[in-house]
Structures are given as structure tokens and as C-alpha cells.
Amino acid sequence: MHISSKRVCPMRRSVEMQGALSSVLQLLLLSCSVRVAAGYPFRTPLDLDVTPRVTVLSSGLQGCKHFQSSAAVNYTTMLLEADSERLYVGARGAVFALNASDISASSALTIEWEASPEQKRQCRLKGKDNKTQCFNHIRFLQRFNSTHLYTCGTHAFSPLCAYIDEKRFVMSSQPEDGKEKCPYGPTTGYTALIIDQEMYSASQYEFRSFPDIRRNFGSLKLKTEDAPTRWLNEADFVGSALVRESLGSSTGDDDKIYFFFTEKSQEQTTSYSHSRVARVARVCKGDRGGRLTLQKRWTSFLKARLMCSLPEYDFHFNMLRSMFVIPGHTPQDTVFYGVFGLEWKNVKASAVCRFSLPDVQRAFEGPYMESQNSDFKWKEYTGKIPDPRPGTCITDALRAKGINISISLPDDVLDFVRRHPLMSQQIQPSDKRPLLFRRSTDYTHMAVLMVQALDGQTYPVLYMGTDEGWLHKAVEVKGHLHIIEELQLFDEPQPVNSLVISTKQMSVYVASSSSVVQLPLSNCNRYTSCYDCIFARDPHCAWNGDQCVDIMAHEDRSTLIQDIENGSKGCENTQDDVALRSRSVRVGDDVLLQCELSSNLATPFWTLDCSELQGYDLNSGFRTGTDGLLIIEARQDQSGLYTCYSVENNIKVPIVTYNVTIRPPSPLPVVPPDLIDTLPPPTELPTSKRPLPPPPAPLLPHSDLLSPRNMEVMYLSLITILGGLCVVLTVVLIYVGFCLQVGHRGKYSLRAAAAAYPKKHSKNRKQHRSSSHMELKTISSHCNGNSICNGVSKQQSSNIQDGGLLQIVPGEGKTSPNKGLLPPAPPLPPTLQRASPEYDIPSGLSATLPSMLRRMNGNSYMLLRQTDSENTSPVCYSFAEELNKILEKRKHTLLLPKPDESSV
Ligand SMILES: *[C@@H]1O[C@H](CO)[C@@H](O)[C@H](O)[C@H]1NC(C)=O
Ligand SMILES: *[C@@H]1O[C@H](CO)[C@@H](O)[C@H](O)[C@H]1NC(C)=O
Ligand SMILES: *[C@@H]1O[C@H](CO)[C@@H](O)[C@H](O)[C@H]1NC(C)=O
Ligand SMILES: *[C@@H]1O[C@H](CO)[C@@H](O)[C@H](O)[C@H]1NC(C)=O
Ligand SMILES: *[C@@H]1O[C@H](CO)[C@@H](O)[C@H](O)[C@H]1NC(C)=O
Ligand SMILES: *[C@@H]1O[C@H](CO)[C@@H](O)[C@H](O)[C@H]1NC(C)=O
Ligand SMILES: *[C@@H]1O[C@H](CO)[C@@H](O)[C@H](O)[C@H]1NC(C)=O
């Protein structure tokens, strides 16, 4: 076993060395390219960045059901039918009918629909990619009439559509041509609706064609205009919706169909140019086209720009990724929720903006834009506007004038429409700012549910899928989004393709490349204490005095406690159990008092014998991390009752109390190394005894947030440090590479997630909220593995890449062979960052590493790599657990057979 591990380790190392170097270089390159792109990191609105409160890895997901067919991949389209309780799913080469109450049930019905080998061959001849494009990707699946569904597929770059007999779940006829209804490729932007058995679709259907919004079926086919003014420019469609504005309209207005997309910008802009902009376009449902001008073209097409930006930072989210439309009690109450991204492909960031229908309508009633000549410079049109107003639907006023159909519209009106598709006013979001800004996450899709909370108010709850297969659940309170939780849906990172919510099933369905997942809308029993339940601010969940429960399951809601608005009130009189643990160690030992905070928004706060633990710096002998307190080289006067509090929303909640007894040293025999692993691991048992100290404590003062200017300085120094680090690392790598050739002993590797540990890098610079700085200290090994080198290098990672792993490999280990290679660390969630404490935490546990390694019986350690979070397996290891093991091991080697940690 020794031999085999020796064989394995050097190879692993050299590979990982390259990984370290390249990841550092990538970081450097990224910081540079980002810097060019409009100074992104220098004026980041960091204080607006929202951190998900709770992170749940896929291993911890509860009540989730999967559907995955061996016959299909690329699940993209979903249609939920509440009445039949069926979930229809379109994938690559198949359509499925699933039982919506349990999609994993074996009752799934399937229609297999793949392109023939001959069609695939022709697709290849067209030069298309036979790994992605030459399949039948189902892009459209909706109800046609009461008995039939309608579906379209790309069919190996030659789209087809077909009717599906719902009852028998078979195709009811031969597939028909889909060239004007469905795009040719699997990823082309596309949206379509069936309204009253007419199909409205928008896409750039073929690669070379212009994007187009079409109405198909029957004799009323319409499309957009290309000349002399092109109405759509490389438009990438993400959504569409019917708004029944005719209902209750005092002017006899028509229903309208809205289309949402991103396209190449036409407007002149004052600042730097935005090459792409987000838009909404609309047409009237009753449009019949013009007589001579605009024959078989829309006479009601108008478009306007959707704004979603943080103007004070010059941050414009121009890429629309997803749009969700919530119908209101009346059409005027319709609300649009959009997910927006940045134009720069190498920078991940998302914003969520909300728009109201009246704001959208106002833009369409405002001034038009005009292109004077062919130089594509668009300016506001200030001339005379013909009557009736171009682009409006047929209303009672027009009918009174004898115009009851768009064909009867005067020619000058139609000609104006033809040349003026763009409105001048930009549509601002509600409150003129995003509801949410999030760095390092690209949301791909979103669905919104209105949930009535105990306070009688209705809160929008947003379910947002990311490009890496996470689901973020957020609640909108007073114009801000609070992310309740982030859930890892898939072990393999993959983009979320679509999201559907069912209130009947209380489920959210998520489709991705590999499978469809069904999750409960909420999981209240995840919250174990009253404060945990209140802080979560989940409108579905409330505390019933004993546990966190789903309010839907409770008839009598008068006794339930919930505070969505502030997330702080209601638990003052509840007493949560606080675990009491005992630790008894000898003078000079290192003791780790574990205290895991379940919330990413909480910060730890420690007291010793009921008074605040002063000074966590190097000389105090204490070190805190986000999951524990380390007492270094314990002294006898450090005995006492240590209590860990979780501080969230300015409320201190006790988590655990340790009774630490530090005994004087006594000379004892050293355990032979071979016996170490036969010793039972010391265990801690929480006692039933109630702790003495902690009633919830008073509020803490609030800390100031950093100004963007300070951040600038910070980033500048960061880049300098990174540059320096790169040089140091290269030297170290070359040196170690030489060592490896000479031969090196190594037995096990340890990895620890280091990113979770906030770190203060200088006394006068405060750690900023949710930025994740990482400090890695390296001790490179001598070639003989016995003496210790002290090539210590420091690194602070850029916070663009939030994940990070520290891997330690001892040159010589006294562990058993089965500890050989620990499983690799898990992919860190994109947001394993902590909010900054109300006070400075001087350093994370990682900072204590060298002082411990120093005393590891002559073992020497070195930094192997700092990896991206993506490429690792999903087994979770806490840094503290690893440290605990190291500490325990060391104690055993130094001390006697009797475990020196006792349980009371
Ligand atoms: C389809 O699924 C495969 C495997 O899951 C994935 O590699 C590929 O990128 C997917 N293609 C599209 C167009 O989503
Ligand atoms: C769906 O499953 C539920 C229980 O799993 C069952 O009661 C119901 O009959 C099923 N519905 C259909 C349409 O198969
Ligand atoms: C794609 O085509 C190449 C040759 O042109 C062939 O080797 C490969 O197997 C094909 N892949 C698929 C998935 O059909
Ligand atoms: C629904 O449409 C299909 C396809 O056109 C047709 O065969 C069927 O009769 C229609 N059903 C009803 C109830 O109109
Ligand atoms: C429009 O009005 C004309 C007479 O003015 C009438 O003949 C025609 O049927 C009307 N069309 C519609 C669609 O109401
Ligand atoms: C939330 O806090 C604000 C300001 O502190 C207060 O005015 C409001 O009443 C609180 N709301 C609830 C539901 O406690
Ligand atoms: C802490 O432990 C010591 C002995 O280890 C004991 O005497 C003392 O009573 C304990 N204190 C509490 C509060 O349990």
C-alpha cells in the first residue's frame, strides 16, 4: 500500500501543480480582461450583492424526485396541465407525459420522435454539428385545443411540427412542415404561444434569415418587415405573453401579445455604446395587416427598450435571459419579472428587474424614434404624427370613424408604422432599480409565485435556476429580494433549461440536460429553531412553538409565528435547546470548539464565562473561523464556559456551550504509531443539561459598509499581490518539480475548503460583506521530506471565483494506509461566502495552519493546488473536521492511550 500510494502521489502532484499555475494565471488574466471591460471590479456595487441565506448541497436535498429516461437527454420544454395532473416534457428525440404528483413514477408515457439516419446524414452534409444539432430537439409543446397538443422539433435542422392526441398520447397525424414555426437549432432564441388556435412564434428561424415574429395557421398569417427599416436586429427571443387588455377596456382596446428579447442596439447613446439592448415588442391580436402598404405584415408592431441598470455604478444589464409574466386581478395589474445579465461573457452577474404594464404602455404611447437616412443613427422623431396614432390597435374611436379592421387604416399611417418601429422612451423598472443584484451567478430561468403570508400580505416568491444547476429561492420584500436558500439540484453542473411551478402539487419542476427534478415549494423542517424559522423569511413557513411548519398544513394559524417583513420578531419568548459539551485537555494542546452556523448571513460571536471573548489575534491564543473557535496552546487560565452565538439580523442566538477544562500537563508514554488508528475516535455527546448563560442578547452596533473607492484600492493591491504570487508560485513549482524527480514520500492528502473563511488582510482595511478572500499559507517540503522548508507564500484570491481548495500533503504520515487518499472535496456552492461580521474577525482558521503544521511530528506539508470548484466530487468535508482529525491525531501521538477528551 505504501508503494502504491507512492506511485500515485507524485503523478497527482505534478498534474495538480499545473492546475495551480494555470488557475492562478486564469485569475490574473480574468482580472485584467475584466478591468478592460469598463472597470468592472473597481466600482462593483458589492453592498447590493445578495448572499443566499442557506446553502443546500445535492446530498442534503429532501423530498426531491427525478425523471430521467434512458432514451433521451436535453430536457427543455415543459407543459403543466393542472386538470389532468400531467407534466408534459419535451426532450431530445422524445416527448413524455409524466404524473405531476410524482414525476419519478413508472407510469410515464413516451412518444419517441427522432430524426431518421438519412436526415441526420443530410444535416451533417449541411455542415452541422452531429453531436448537438443533428437531432430532433423538441422546442415547442403547448395545448392546441381541448383534445390535442401541438409540438415542434428541430428535426436535424429541418423543423417539423405535429399534433398529439392527448388521451392516447400518440401523434394524431403525420408531422407537418415547421419551418416558419420552429427554429432550426437547439439553442437559437425562441418563444411561441398558441392563442385561440393560432400560433405566434418569434425566432431567427434559419441561420441566414432575419429574426421574425410570425402568426401562423389559417389565412391571417403575418410577419415583421425587413425593408426599408428592419424591425428586428439579430434578436434573441426569451419569452412572450398574451395580455387580455380588451377585458374591461373603456376604449374597446384589443388583446396584445408581448415579446421579450435582446437585440443589436440601434440608438445613439451618450456614454459608451451598448452593442445589445433588452427590448419588449408588442402586436395587437386582431391585427390583419395592411391593404397595400404592410400587406401580410403587422400594422401594430412597436418595440421599446427595457432598462435594468445601476446607473450610479454605470452598470447596465442589457442581456435579457428570462421573463416571467404574472397576470393581475385586472390586465393593468400585470407584472413582468425579468432576469438580466451583462454583455461581457467572462463576467458572471445577474440582476432581476420588475416592470409594470402601465409603464410599458406609457412608452408605447410616447414619442417615436426615427432613422433619418441610412447611417443607422436613430433619434427621437419630433415631426407630425399621423392620425389615427400609428401602431395602436383598433379601438372604439377608430370604429366610429369607420375603421374596424387594420386593412382599412390609411396609407400614411401604415407607412409611418413601417418606418418607426422603435419608441423613444426607455421603460424603467419599478423603483428605477433592480430588485436583486448578484455577482458570480448567471440565472438562466425564473418562475414566480405569489404567496400569501400570515400577515395577510402577498409576497412574490421567485425560483431562479442558474447555469450551473442551482436553484435560488427568493422572496421580494419592499423592493428587495432576500434569497432564502440555494439548492444544488444536480451533481454535475449543467444549466437549468426551464422551470415550472404547480401550486396544486406544491412543487417546482426543473428541466436540464440530464434530467427533470421535482422539488417541494418549501422545506420548512430544514429550519430547526424558532429564530432559524423566522430569519429564513419563507412565506410558506412559520414556527408553531415546537417546529417550523408549512402554513398551508395548518388550519388554525393564530398561534403561528412568522416575520417576513423584517425577519426578526416573534421568538423573544421561546427557549431553544443549546447543546452543552465538555472538553478536557492538557496545557499546550490545541482545542477546536466547533460551531457550525447554518446561515450564510450569520456571523459567529464567542463569550468566555459570559463576557465577550476579547481579541482574536495571534497573541490572544484564540482564532475564530466560520465554523469554530481554536484555542492554540491552551493555558490553564483559559478554562471556562465558552458559548458560541450566531449573530443574524442583529440578534444573537446561542448555538453551543463548551465547558473547557485545561489540566496541567503530566508526563505520559507516547502511543506507538501502529496503535493510533485502533483507538476509538473520541466523541462528544450533547448533554440534556441546560446551559447556564444565554438568553438572547441585545443588539450589536451596525458596521459601515465599504465605499466603492476603498474597494478600488483593495482590488488594485489584490492584483499586485496576485502578480507577485504568480512569480513566487512559479519558482516554488519549478523547485518542487525538481524535488519530485528526485523522489518524494507521501501518504495521504487532505483537502479543505478554505474559501469559507473570511480573512482580514490588513488592519486598516475592512473585510467587505460577502467578499471571499482566501489565505493560503504554504510550506514547501524539502526533498528528503523530513526537514521543513519555510517558503511561505500568501495568496488572496480574487473574489470573482468564489470556490477554492487547499490541499495539504504531508511528506511523511503516521496514519494508516486506509486513510490513503481522502475523497476529493466537494464543489463549493457558488456562494460559500460569509457576510462580514459586525466586528473584524482577524483571521480564519486557515491562518493557523502553519503553527499547527510546525508541530506535526516533523511532518512537512505543502500546498498542492487551488482548484476551481467545478471539477471535484460532491462529498462534503468541513475544514474544521479535517483540523479536528489532525488535532486528535496529534494528541494521541503526544499523549497516552486514554483519550483526553471526555464527555459529560
Ligand atoms: C444535451 O445534453 C448533453 C449531455 O447532457 C450536453 O452535453 C449538451 O450540451 C446538451 N445540448 C444542448 C443543446 O443543450
Ligand atoms: C399519479 O400518482 C398519484 C400517486 O402517486 C396517483 O394517486 C395518481 O392516480 C397518479 N395519476 C395518474 C394520472 O396516473
Ligand atoms: C459524427 O460524425 C463523425 C464523422 O463525421 C462520426 O465519427 C461520429 O460518430 C458522429 N457522431 C455522432 C454522435 O453521430
Ligand atoms: C383539435 O385539433 C385537431 C387537429 O386539428 C383536430 O383533429 C381535432 O378534431 C380538434 N378537436 C376539437 C375538439 O376540435
Ligand atoms: C367592418 O365594417 C364594415 C362596414 O363598415 C362591415 O362590412 C365589416 O363586416 C366590418 N368588419 C368587421 C371585421 O367588423
Ligand atoms: C419592521 O421594521 C420596521 C422598521 O424597524 C417597522 O416600522 C415595522 O413595523 C416592522 N415590521 C414588522 C412586521 O414588525
Ligand atoms: C465543567 O467541568 C468541570 C469539571 O470538568 C466541572 O467541575 C464543572 O462543574 C463543569 N461546569 C459546568 C457548568 O458544567
Image (cartoon, helix red, strand yellow):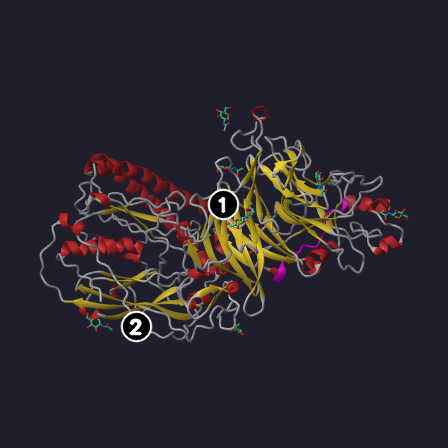
Position of 360 compared to 646: left or right? right
* Badge 2 element: loop
- The yes-or-no answer for disc 1 within 8 Å of ligand 2 is yes
Mark 1 nearby-residue class (10 Å; few <14, some 14–19, many ≥20): few
Position of 123 compared to 380: left or right? left
**Residue 599 lies in the magenta stretch:** no
* Residue type at numbered disc 2: Arg
* Badge 1 element: loop
Tell me whether the residue at label 1 lies in contact with that at label 2, contact meaning CB atoms closer than 8 angstroms.
no
In the rendered image, residue 170, in percent from the top left (x then y), is placed at 61, 36
Q: Which stretch is magenta?
A: 419-431
| Quarter that holds the C terminus | bottom left
Residue at the spot of label 2 = 690
Residue 773 occupies which quadrant of the picture? bottom left
* Residue type at numbered disc 1: Ala
Residue at the (28%, 53%) spot, across then down: 882
Residue at the spot of label 1 = 105
Q: Earlier in the sequence, mark 1 or mark 2?
A: 1
Report if residue 330 is visible in the image.
Answer: yes
Residue at the (67%, 55%) spot, across then down: 427
Toward the viewer: 395 or 737? 395
Q: What secondary structure predominates along the stretch shown in magenta?
A: loop
In the rendered image, residue 776, in percent from the top left (x then y), is placed at 32, 51
